[in-house]
Image: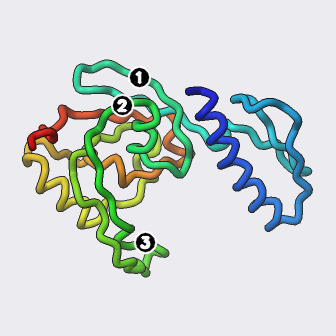
Amino acid sequence: KQFKIATMALRHLASKTRAFSQSNNLVVSLTKRSFSADAVVKSENRTFSVKDVTISLNIVDPSGARRQVPGLIGKSIYETCQMHNIDLGPVSVGGAVEEIRSDTWTEPLYGEGPTAGYDHVLLNGNGTETAKPMTHVEANMLDHYWDEDEIFPESRLASQVLLTKQMDGMIVYVPDRLVDDIP
């Protein structure tokens, strides 16, 4: 499993490095190593590593058990939990509803957004303020699937929160799941 995470992180890092080096006319070389967590990509100005695209999340399940898992920057909390066999329930996500481009301009993208609200989580700690604001569709899904006393200001859908570097060490609380297996 660690090999899979390291491989995904290196591919993500390599794509970022190529884009960075092309935009800044840098000569980039990959250090000859096996795919491991400490693999390094070197450039003239900077040394890149898997740690540059990986953060640590603390997942707390309904029983109170804590689990620290690595996550890739740019992936959603749901994808990270799925990679580590943490069950958040089913998810159904359409395209993005809108993208905030500046303080004065929000571009409508005409996607349907989340279409289920089973993947409810509570965010606390590092980087929670760096998550994109909740869309009206996400708020509607939370209201539709969860009772009023189960929704808090920290409530989000795990499929809608993309990981950022500032979220390293963030705590993600997973509430009791809704029953989703009734035929």
Residue at disc 2, secondary structure = loop
Res. 86 mark: 2
Structural distance between the alpha carbons of marks 2 and 1: 10 Å
Q: Kindly identify the residue that appears in the image at 84 percent across and 31 percent down.
A: 33
Residue 39 occupies quadrant = top right
Q: Closest to the observer: 124 or 110?
A: 110
Density class for disc 1 (Cα within 10 Å; few <14, some 14-19, many ≥20) is some
Q: Nearer the viewer, mark 2 or mark 1?
A: 2
Density class for disc 2 (Cα within 10 Å; few <14, some 14-19, many ≥20) is some
Query: Image quadrant for the C terminus?
Result: top left
Residue at disc 1, secondary structure = strand
Residue at disc 3, secondary structure = strand
Lower sequence index among marks 3 and 2:
2
Q: Which residue is mark 1?
A: 67
Q: Which residue is mark 3?
A: 99
| Residue type, mark 1 in image | Arg
